[in-house]
Amino acid sequence: MSVTEQGLLERDKDTMTLNMGPQHPSTHGVFRVILEMDGEVVETAEPEIGYLHTGIEKTSENKRYVHVIPMTDRLDYLNPPGNNLAFCLATEKLLGVEIPERAQALRVIMCELARIASHLVWLGTHALDIGAMTVFLYCWREREMVLDLNEEISGVRMMTSYIRIGGVAKDATRPWLDGIRDFIDYFPAKVDEYESLLTKNPIWMDRTQGIGVFSREEAINWSLSGPALRASGVNWDIRKSRPYSGYEKYGFEVPVYQGGDIYDRYRVRVEEMRQSREIINQAIQKLPTGDYKTPDNKVSLPPRETLHTSMEALIHHFKLVSEGVSVPKGETYVPIEGPRGEVGFYIVSDGTNVPYRVKLRAPSFMAIPGMCQMMTGCYIADVVGIIGSIDIVMGEVDR
Amino acid sequence: MTGEEIIATVKAGLPDTIQDTALPQGDAVIFVAPDCLQKVAAFLKDDPSLKFDYLSDVSGVDYLIEEREPRFEAVYLLYSIDHSHSIRIRVGIEEENPSVPTVSELWKGALYPEQELFDMFGIHIEGHPRMERLIMPKDWVGHPLRKDYPLTTEPVAFSYNRDFKSELVKSKPPTR
């Protein structure tokens, strides 16, 4: 009697439940997914989040506007300037303050440096998940330079809190600008180097092409954004469609690919690093002179040296430090283009110096259901590739 | 389209269902009752001149301290990729048995933020396939983003110098 006749191999409907995470190295944080497996094929993928919940939205309702900025750093910890910028833009929209051109250019430089650093972390870890160790080490080498530049301008390597309500924390310094010039001269050859390791690599192509495919309609309906959406053929970049901080003044391309698979998401992000370098280059070339924060002393602190001579400056300084900015009553939503997609803050103000409600629109959070939809029907070995290609950051998923 | 044009189109297409409109800083905002939400959402998505095919986010607000009626509000942020314009739908929700119909049949991306709305505000989403906690643990009591949910610290389970510290706290009055 064979095994089939004995009924030992009647496993048509028999699936295996496999737990992945939250302490799995390739889930990029504490993401947990429960996979229902039919052999090696994923039947359903059930996400489980909340392991990194820190209650930042609740805490924000009890802090002044200025005090919220350092907390936004911790949301998407690979893109602190982007989060600062989204929060400050929303607050400034309610306040109705104009930002000087120099401050806007400095903001753009910071955000694009953060985009490069974030994509380097993504490329390194994504390639490492799929099995390419060298790329990880190369990417970390260049990311280190960006972190050194962060340290030079803000004193902190990652959680910069450099962008403030009304402008930026301090003016650009000569060593910082020189460091950026050196970096943008050095960087394009390194992007070519990553591409020479991966783009035409047959193993990389086998592991990424045609896997985790989302069509244009699916990607829009599941609220993917950023590079994941542009890899599915949607030409939508908030820097172009609703320009903020003077992005309309810079000439850059928005890479769009049609495949919608892991490989195309990879190509979109690699090309974005080149475009970010291009934006930084233009911003450095024509960095406007002038103030690095708004001269409106009801919003930003007066210059330090005026405190000794001007009574009015002293009063403004005292009021701002002891009480903070009071934001007019209202509600607003401002989106920006982060490295992972649309980052936006929905702020409700009740007219006091403390926000009534702060809600982050987090691209990683919105992408998780779609990502698990992509996993159904693929092999278990591709699950790590799909998670890496969406580039989730659990800090902004759980908040 | 600009905010005024969007509001004019919505008002013309759905004459009796829009409660109110607003244009804060030029953004189009419409106020809708919960039972009309699905009708309005379907119109906004299908109308060729509006074509709001992308759902950015769903967020909730608790207006308890403002003493506004109704107490809760769900805010739907919609965007049109082809026309690059946006709209906010604000849906007022009563305090007694708060509930709002789902829009996840139109936009699959609404599944997660709607579940978060239930988790954080206790607003029931009618027709949502998974009405359970998302971010908080499954056995959590209360809805943290409600304004009557206190912001407290957890008691420390054990501390190396606890007795010493509590004595110190007692002997030293707070400076503020």
Image (spheres, rainbow, N blue to C red):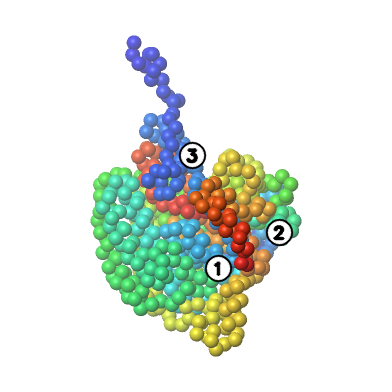
Cα–Cα span, label 2 and label 3: 37 Å
Residue flagged by tag 1: what amino acid is it?
Val
Q: Position of residue A387 (x, y in %)?
A: 41, 47
Total labels drawn: 3
What's the chain of the residue with tag 1? A
Dot 3 alpha-carbon crowd within 10 angstroms: few under 14, some 14 to 19, many 20 or more: some
In the image, what residue occupies the spot 71% across and 54% down? B71
Same chain for marks 2 and 3?
no
**Mark earlier in primary sequence (3, 1):** 3
In the image, what residue occupies the spot 46% across and 69% down? A162
Confirm whether residue B2 shows in the render: no
Q: Which residue is mark 1?
A: A66
Q: Which mark, by number, is residue A46?
A: 3
Tell me the element at label 2.
loop
Give the residue at the far top of this rendering: A1
Q: Which residue is mark 2?
A: B65
Q: Is residue B98 left or right of residue A207?
A: right
The mark lying in front, picked from 3 and 1, is 1
Q: Is residue A381 left or right of residue A66?
A: left
- The quarter in which the N terminus of chain A is drawn is top left
Mark 2–mark 3 contact, CB under 8 Å?
Answer: no
Mark 3–mark 1 contact, CB under 8 Å?
Answer: no
Mark 1–mark 2 contact, CB under 8 Å?
Answer: no
Q: Give A324 or A288, whichever is nearer the viewer.
A: A324
Confirm whether residue A52 shows in the render: yes
What's the chain of the residue with tag 2? B
What's the chain of the residue with tag 3? A
Tell me the element at label 3.
strand
Residue flagged by tag 3: what amino acid is it?
Glu
Q: Position of residue A340 (x, y in %)?
A: 44, 56
Q: Give A231 or A166, whichever is nearer the viewer.
A: A166
Cα–Cα span, label 1 and label 2: 22 Å
